[in-house]
Amino acid sequence: MYEEVARIALGAGTEAVLSRIQPLASEFAQPLEELYHRWGEDPAVAWRWSFDMHLRLVGLRFSQDVWYLAQVQGRPVSAMLLCRSKFCPQLGSIHRVYTAEPYRRRGLASKLLKLAINDFEASGGQALIISTEHNDSAMSFYEQYHFVTINESESSRTGNRIAWRISDGDSPENFLKHLFAPSTAVFMRSSDRADVPLLLSLFNAPDNRIVRHYGLQMLGDANIGADDFFPAFEQQEGDVAVLTGLTAASGAIVGWGSIMPPVYPWPNPYYQQHQLLVDCYLAAGHIEQAPILLNEMLRQLPANHFANQLIGHVPLDHPALPAAYEQAGFERVGFIPKAYIDPRNNQGTDIALYLRER
């Protein structure tokens, strides 16, 4: 669907056409790639935008994304993306907010953001999340539209600030309370924490392994950031059966765990339909709590889930996880030498595979 929304005079006989597009039609892919190529001079960043655009075209059959464009003479000069959770329609996120240099300070991004917010709330949306670098001017812009900071991280590629906007008539506390009810959400709730803070905490983890396993490996280790998380997650075909966290007495989340369908590089319906991958990570100083975290993850897995095999992949040199898996009824069935490459030191880690039949 392509819909022209408004026309704005820019002076000197030039006008910008504002439009919404859902889903992204293939004829807009190259113009948007060219627009985002101007976002920084780093070739790796330019490549990432192109690759991300390709992923969005590939993922159209899952997507509820809406693109908002301002075009001059048929070429995009300002754009942003509204993603809406297919699992929890009250939750949305704004991404890829960018205006080409010659067209800045003309109010184009402001008008597109207003349009996106109005569309989202008119269709029942309650909370919008946006991620930005530590950029005071960008944050000041979003604050005009009632976004407030809820998380800051220095561990992603540039340091990210995550803000959200709660619709009028609701509060963050109330929204978090009902947002991820098990009947409507992809995530199983932790026993005493809502899942949005848990998700955001992943970006503060010193090891981003779990983040990559949520589909972000497609973007490359060095390019993972909070702004990628929500749209990339929505493109996954399967659902996450369990996402849980382990909380210290201080309230900090010190352990993360997930049980989710595998994403293999080869097509094999049996594995996709009958296996789930188990992964967990514990912060330094809390590794002895591995059995507690793993048992809680298994407890949360629905008894009627279709999968009949659980596969855990565990670093052999981990001081607690191999024993925790064995205590939980897993059997070691395989070994992959140097399977996991830590991007921080380029060193490989031997991985043991553990199997548990259901």
Image (spheres, grey):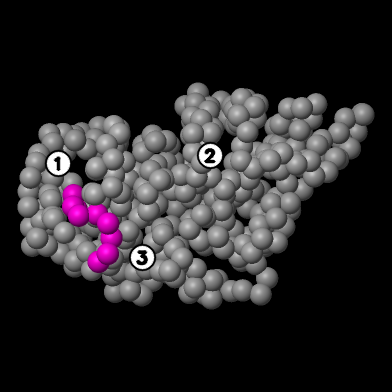
Residue type at mark 3: give it.
Met
Q: Is residue 249 visible?
A: yes
- Label 2 crowding class (10 Å Cα cut-off): few <14, some 14-19, many 20+? some
Q: Residue at x 41, y 59 (%)?
A: 186
> Which residue position is annotated with label 2?
60
- Label 3 crowding class (10 Å Cα cut-off): few <14, some 14-19, many 20+? many
**Residue 352 appears left or right of 242:** left
Q: Secondary structure at mark 1?
A: strand
Query: Is residue 310 in the magenta section?
Result: yes
Query: Is residue 148 in the magenta section?
Result: no
Q: Where does the image place residue 38, in percent across and percent down from the top left?
A: 62, 27
Q: Secondary structure at mark 2?
A: helix
- Indicate which disc, 1 or 2, sits on the residue closer to the N terminus: 2
- Label 1 crowding class (10 Å Cα cut-off): few <14, some 14-19, many 20+? many
Q: CA distance from mark 3 to mark 1?
A: 27 Å
Answer with the quarter of the image where residue 39 lies: top right
Of 358 and 291, nearer the camera is: 358
Magenta region's main secondary structure? loop
